[in-house]
Amino acid sequence: MSNILLYVSNIFILLSFIIYFIMIIINRGNKVTNSNGFDITKDIISEYNSINIIESKGYFTFYNIKRKVIKLDTKTYYGNDLSSIVIALISAGISIVHNSKNKYIEFFRKIFSNIKILYIFPLIAILINYSTYNISDAKVSIIFLIFFSIISYILINIKNQAFMWTIDNINKIKDISKSNSDKIVKFIDKIIWLDKFIFFGELIMIIRYVLILLEIN
């Protein structure tokens, strides 16, 4: 039973990451607006002058929680495809959640510059999972996984708030039609579901460690 849970939990997490990247790649050519990621992001957060948007020279888009700056990677900054717009709007939504004094983002702000770095924890969890086979290992591993699962739950909560804000405000964007806004909402919803699968994978790991501690094979 323990070995089954080992593989099931790892598959939940790895498959979620793989599906996410496949979704992003597939929808790079799916044009949903004539405007680029910068203009769409600027439009939807136009009421919030304290949040800045810049082009990032890196490979990833993220909201810098220390400087309150949305950093769009070059593809997202100039892109008008579904993937680019979704990535931009997720960062915009998180910036608004932060602007509303979200206590979790304020806490992370003391340690990290962006919350995307927290997604490394599920990958660390997989490594821990593969190295846990006896009671002494499980005593340590279960502490890490409880911590990681709490982080995942918080990230889902933050993204859900960002998602709800996006749904409420996406119709304000003039350059996105109703049909394309529906595509964007469905895409973001799928991403949140992938986050939930990662969370489920971590919970399965915790169950595995409990079984090891109880010496149930």
Image: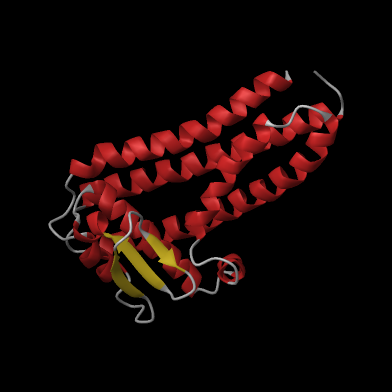
Taking depth in this image into account, of 122 and 158 the one nearest to the observer is 122
Locate the C terminus and report the quarter of the image it occupies.
top right
Q: Is residue 204 visible?
A: no
Find the residue positioned furthest to the front. Answer: 131
Query: Percent position (x, y) of residue 133?
Result: 76, 27
Find the residue positioned furthest to the right. Answer: 214
Q: Residue at x 54, y 48 (%)?
A: 120
Colouring scheme applied when the structure was drawn: secondary structure
Query: Percent position (x, y) of residue 138?
Result: 79, 35
User: In this picture, is 181 found above or below 130?
Assistant: below
User: In this picture, is 71 found above or below 31?
Assistant: below
Left or right of 39? Residue 187 is right
Left or right of 31? Residue 57 is right
Left or right of 104? Residue 53 is left
Which quarter of the figure has residue 140? top right
Locate the N terminus and report the quarter of the image it occupies.
top right
Find the residue positioned furthest to the left. Answer: 34
Q: Residue at x 54, y 31 (%)?
A: 12
How many numbered tags mark residues here?
0
Query: Percent position (x, y) of residue 204?
Result: 67, 32
User: In this picture, is 90 found above or below 39?
Assistant: above
User: In this picture, is 52 found above or below 88?
Assistant: below
